[in-house]
Image: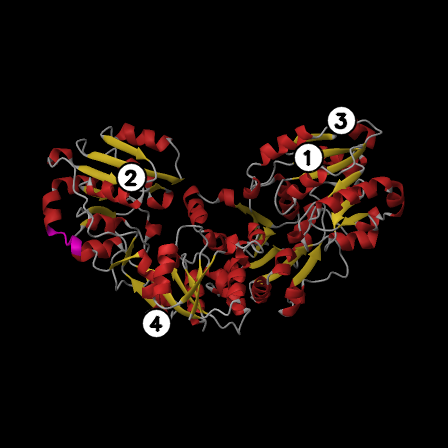
Amino acid sequence: MKILFSTFYNEELKERIKKFSSLGYDVIIYNCHLDKNEENRFKNRHFQMYESILNFAQKEKIDIIYFHDYLTVPEYLLAELKVRPNFTPRIIFSMFLREVNRSLARAQTIKELLDMPQIIRVITFGMGLKDFPYPETMINVKTNFSKIKKVGGVFYSIDRSSKLKKNIPTSMNDIVMLYPGRWIYSKGTDIFVEATKYIDKDITILAHKNPMEDDYGHAIQDDLLKNHPQTIFIEKYLEPEKMRKLFFDSHAVICSHRRLYEYSETGIPGESSLAKIPIVAPDFNFFREIIKKYKTGILYEPENPIALANAINQMKKQYNEIVSNAKFEESIENYIKEDDIPKIAMEDL
Amino acid sequence: MKIVFFNGEEVTDKHLAIQKLKEAGHEVFLYSLDKIPPNRRKLIEIRHFQMYEHILDHAQEVNADILYFACPISCPELMIYELRARPDFKPKITFMGQLRELNRSMARSLCLKELVDLPQISRVTFSTLIQENIKLPDNLIKVGGLNKEKTNYISEYYNVDPKLFDSVTRKESRDYFGIKYDEFVLLNSGSWSYIKGTDIFIEAIKHINKDITIFIHKNTSGRIGEDPNFLNSQKLFESTIKAYKNIISIERRSTHEEMVMLYKCADLVLCSHRKLYEYSVSGIPGMAALAEVPIVAPDFYYFNELIDRYKIGVKYEPENAMDMARSIDYAKNNIEKINKNAKYKESIKNYYDPYDAPFKVIPNI
């Protein structure tokens, strides 16, 4: 079977392609942005990316198009498919449910897309949950769920035999709470910084900032240090293994995500469970389901800095109890390695 | 009538159109992205697809009779699904369409057709450079065209009052920019972008007759700002003007008065647009015609149709820098003949005052 592995990134994908090929498929990689005949078209016409991919698939007599990157504008793909009723390659793509959760219009698009005969499988993710609920918008538009395959969660380059060991002071007077990743609006960094005004002063905040994306600028870092001097600040992109070490070197992790993150995917619950540390997270899906099911942390009222501060302080006070009740290992049972997604996607087809 | 007047940003030019609507007795609410509260605006930045959701919500909240998009709907695919999700949406929508995108994509043609067929859409208006016998893109024809009763075509100037062209002479314009009266001036005006072929123009400069004074006006206006493909345009601009002695330049957002003087002081105006621009509009031919200056433009629709019909300039092979330079030289050598044959006034006879746009676009007002 001839598979088109479509990606928009020029990243190292050899291992994944090799794995895909080892399943017995003839895999062709295609990045339309690197196509010399096509690249200039997209400079002003992003909506034509799918046109290019579908044209290429048809020309190369592809059996299945596998979209490696998450589908971000399903309306464009749907529009492209509607004008090619005789398009023979089948399509597999992955998506997050968070955008569907907020928009009835987008749920309708997804429904129509799933009804197209060319779409044979859609992969979506649940932060560790396998049987998570679908957003109401999708239920309201009567989506055909049979083509959707739920994947619990994804670890990038997981190595469960990791030799990482905790290297943190054990005294409860020196609890270290990690705030990791990009400082962006949807992750509510401003909410977290506001909350630091109210947290116990003996908590050490390990504030990691991935500089690749930043919605706030340097002023917010100054605010953080002013609000909570007991802060260690790291501004650096870290490779997955180094990032993982930060989790191992902390007692707990803080999530300040905004409500718009509901039904989305983040690596934090998985990485925390791998390091056997609990999380402080907003009370919405999938954080809610994860924490209720596996007792891996504390929930607070979303987008409320005081509630977040109270939850952080509560985490400090009840730390031993929370850690002893948490089912860390169970909570990552449904995780797979990112490289295994194609295999999961192709199952039973 | 209650009209929600949507524009990307709160531009002064459009305020005059709003004023005219108000004088005609309509209740007008200007709604722009600037008006959206910061939190919701942030959401739109993250979820671009929800922009139409916010605009439609607003029109519904204020019980508007008409939702007038004074700017093109850049993603008709998203608008279709937003409207389908609200079958009871009452305000009638009018919007501007762009033929250039339909020219390239069958999918987009079909989307636009579907969008126009929705009962909430009362009118789609295309800006064109010609007014009669408009040829439609093949893709649009293949999907069956658009509902004719809901479609119209307009031509407009570059948002500049035509009367301004009578208020200043060529000599005054040259004095203003410090250009001698006997110099032959080629004007290149506008923002620097890929679609406008700035890189092709820069390549052509190497081959243009050195007797020609090249006047570059790098326009810094526009809400999008720099084209991401020209992020180093400042460096490019500086190195270009340093490299050639026959270049003069200004870099700013010009007033209408200065825009008029730019065109009035030119002998020739260049359009360096890429093929992607086919079926699109540009303010340049209208401004040049008002100043009675010929254009050098790529040989594709609408530029070629405009030049063939009204003899207002010289064509060159699109995206070919050498041919662009050759055509500029040809135009310089034949400038008297071109000016004698050019039907400048005829080429803009059906253009209308941009401040009257809503009255031309919105049905029954």
Q: Is residue A268 magenta?
A: no
- How far apart are labels 4 and 1 at the CA level? 58 Å
Residue A185 seen in the figure: yes
Q: Identify the mark at residue A146; answer none if there is no mark.
A: 4
In the picture of the structure, the residue carrying the numbered disc 2 is A192
Chain hosting mark 4: A
Q: Secondary structure at mark 3?
A: helix
3 vs 4, front mark: 4
Between the residue at mark 3 and the residue at mark 4, the CA separation in whole angstroms equals 71 Å
- For marks 3 and 1, the one nearer the N-term is 3
Q: How much space separates mark 4 and mark 2, taking CA atoms?
A: 39 Å
Question: In the image shown, does A117 or A5 lie closer to the viewer?
Answer: A5
What is the CA distance from the residue labelled 3 to the residue labelled 1?
Answer: 14 Å
Whether the magenta-drawn stretch holds residue A328 is answered as yes
From the image, tell me which residue sits under label 3.
Answer: B176
**Crowd class of label 4 (few under 14; some 14 to 19; many from 20; radius 10 Å):** few
Q: Amino acid at mark 4?
A: Ser
**Label 4 and label 1 in one chain:** no
Q: Residue at horizontal 76%, vertical 53%?
A: B304
Kindly indicate whether the residue at mark 2 contacts the one at mark 4 (C-beta within 8 angstroms).
Answer: no
